[in-house]
Structures are given as structure tokens and as C-alpha cells.
Image: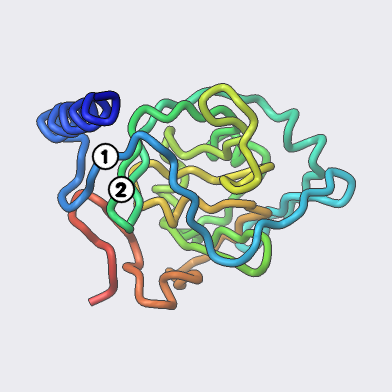
Amino acid sequence: MALFDLSNERREREREMRTAGRLPPGQSLTLKWPVLHEGSVPRFDPQTWDFRVFGLVEEPLTLPWKEFSNLPQTEVLADMHCVTRWSRFDNHWGGVLASELMRLIRVRPEARHVMVHAEQGYSSNLPLSDFLCLTTIFALRHDGEALVAEHGYPLRLVVPHLYAWKSVKWVRGIELLDKELPGFWEQNGYNIYGDPFTEQRYST
């Protein structure tokens, strides 16, 4: 009976989200939070961890963990849509807005794109305008708790309006660019932009 009730709850919630225009085409609601990533889960050492901002900036910036984690923080409520066709709604993210980080640097006028760099050489790209959206956040917390390692601890970039491969786990820096370059999954057949509401899953 409990399984039946849970299934009914999920279906009802899915209908509600689809009616509200929050469930993209081809997606299904999940009440869990699946773990998906490339490579192994890296170890975090706060003594050696740092965050870099480089590329088309007037002065490169490097922040050690203590400085980054002490930047002004806020909360963002947002949905998450994975290219593997699950959606998780109303995630509470806590951390540093991308726009807040950018207050610390002067971007050169020719910068138009961002390459996000993470542990183990992983990367993902997005336009600078998307990076600066007020829902783009460097998350330290999820639903009131510190991120767990499998979901990106200590720091995960979250870009809610794009497919979740753009929400890079174990992020270590950003590079400002004047042109669009593909990141890891984009080089391996994923769409260069990744809009879930137009099903930009793969390159054409």
C-alpha cells in the first residue's frame, strides 16, 4: 500500500509540475536525487584547495577555501533537470551567487563565455550572460545540509535553467573567454548549450 501511495504521489506531483510548465518535455519527476558523474569522487583538503578566476580578466584571482567559504552567501530555490530524463523540483541551494563572485574582479569587455573547471580535468562551458543569472550559484549546501561528496562537496556550480551536466561538481575555477569552446561532455556529443525546455540534449 505504501508503494502504491508513493507512486500515486509521484504521478500527481508530475502532473502538477507539467501543468505549471515546470517539467520539460521528455522528463520524469524523481523524489530521490540520483548520483551521476564522470570519474571518481575527489578528496577535499581545505589546506590546499583554492578557487581560480582567470582568462579575460584585468587581474587573475585565487581564493583559498577559507576566503571563498566566507564570501557573502544567499539561498536559491530551483528545479534540476538531468539530460538522463529525471527532474527534481524545489531544491534549496545555499552558497555564493556567481554574480557575487564577479564583484571581486574586472572582466575585460571582450569576454563573452565562461569555461568552468573542476577536479580531474572536467570542464563545462556556458555563455557569460547565463553564468551571471541571479539563480546561478556556487553551492555549498543543499536542502539545509552541507553537500555530500557524491553531489559535489565542497563546492558545486548550479545553473538551474540548463541541463544538470552544466551544474559542475567539485568546481575549482572559471576561465573567461571571448569565444565559445566545448567542455568535457560537449566534446563528447552533448549540446553546446543544453536548454531542457527545448530538449537540447545532444549535438546535431
Residue that carries the numbered disc 2 in the rendered image = 86
Q: Give the residue displayed 71% in from the left and 54% down from the top.
A: 52
For label 1, the crowd category at 10 Å Cα-Cα, with few meaning under 14, some 14 to 19 and many 20 or more, is some
Residue 60 in the image, given as x and y percentages of width and height: 73, 55
User: Residue at position x 43%, y 33% from top?
Assistant: 134
In the rendered structure, which disc, 1 or 2, sits on the residue that comes first in sequence? 1
Cα distance in 3D space between marks 1 and 2: 6 Å
Answer whether labels 1 and 2 touch (C-beta < 8 Å): yes
Question: On the rendered structure, is 202 left or right of 96?
Answer: left
* Type of amino acid at the residue the image marks with label 2: Trp
Amino acid on which the number 1 mark rests in the picture: Leu
Residue 174, picture quadrant = bottom right
Vertical arrangement, residue 190 with respect to residue 33, above or below: below
Q: In the drawing, what numbered circle is on residue 29?
A: 1
The crowd level at tag 2 (other Cα within 10 Å; few <14, some 14-19, many 20+) is many
Apparent side of residue 23 relative to residue 123 in the rendered image (left or right): left
Q: Which residue lies furthest to the right in this view?
A: 47
Question: Helix, strand or loop at disc 2?
Answer: strand
Q: In which quarter of the image is the C terminus?
A: bottom left
Q: How many marks?
A: 2
